[in-house]
Image: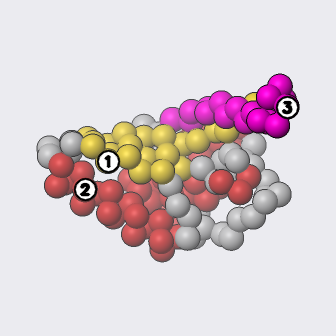
Amino acid sequence: MKLTQEKCEACQVGAPKVTSEEQEQYLQELDDWIVITEVKETRNYVDNETSTTKKINKLFKEYKFKNYALALEFATQVANLAEQENHHPLIALEWGRVRVWWWTHAIEGLHKNDFVCAAKTDEL
């Protein structure tokens, strides 16, 4: 089944992240999406010495538009998709462009849901 025909499943802490093989397979169904890795450092301010570093994979794509109004309209469509799927991305809106990051907060990484939503974003 194509990603665009699937529905996001409820995801919670402990759900499995996609494997590298699954990631490559799903990426083949997407146009111009890339996987970026965010390095997140958390510092313990009590002893000011302990810190934890996490690497969080995210799907990313930038869309370009002729003006702000068209970019805003698209960002709103992405927000509506997120509500329908109950899966919410980071959306950055600027004049003439919208940047979208999909990842699963509960597992701090990529789940199949992210690829489903990325594919559906491309259909907007």
Report the amino acid beneath label 2.
Answer: Leu
Of tags 2 and 3, the one toward the viewer is 3
In three-dimensional space, the C-alpha distance between marks 1 and 3, rounded to whole angstroms, equals 38 Å
Give the SS element for disc 1. strand
Residue 47 in percent (x, y) is at 85, 31
Q: Is residue 86 left or right of residue 57?
A: left
Q: Residue at x 18, y 49 (%)?
A: 68
Q: Is residue 41 magenta?
A: yes
Label 3: which residue? Answer: 47
Report the amino acid beneath label 3.
Answer: Asp
Q: Residue at x 21, y 42 (%)?
A: 96
Q: How many marks?
A: 3
The mark that comes first in sequence, 1 or 2, is 2
Label 2: which residue? Answer: 72
Near mark 2 (Cα within 10 A), the count class, few <14, some 14-19 or many ≥20, is some
Give the SS element for disc 2. helix
Q: Is residue 113 magenta?
A: no
Give the SS element for disc 3. loop
Please give the range of residues in magenta.
34-51
Near mark 3 (Cα within 10 A), the count class, few <14, some 14-19 or many ≥20, is few
Label 1: which residue? Answer: 93
In three-dimensional space, the C-alpha distance between marks 2 and 3, rounded to whole angstroms, equals 44 Å
Q: Residue furthest top?
A: 49
Report the amino acid beneath label 1.
Answer: Leu
The mark that comes first in sequence, 1 or 3, is 3
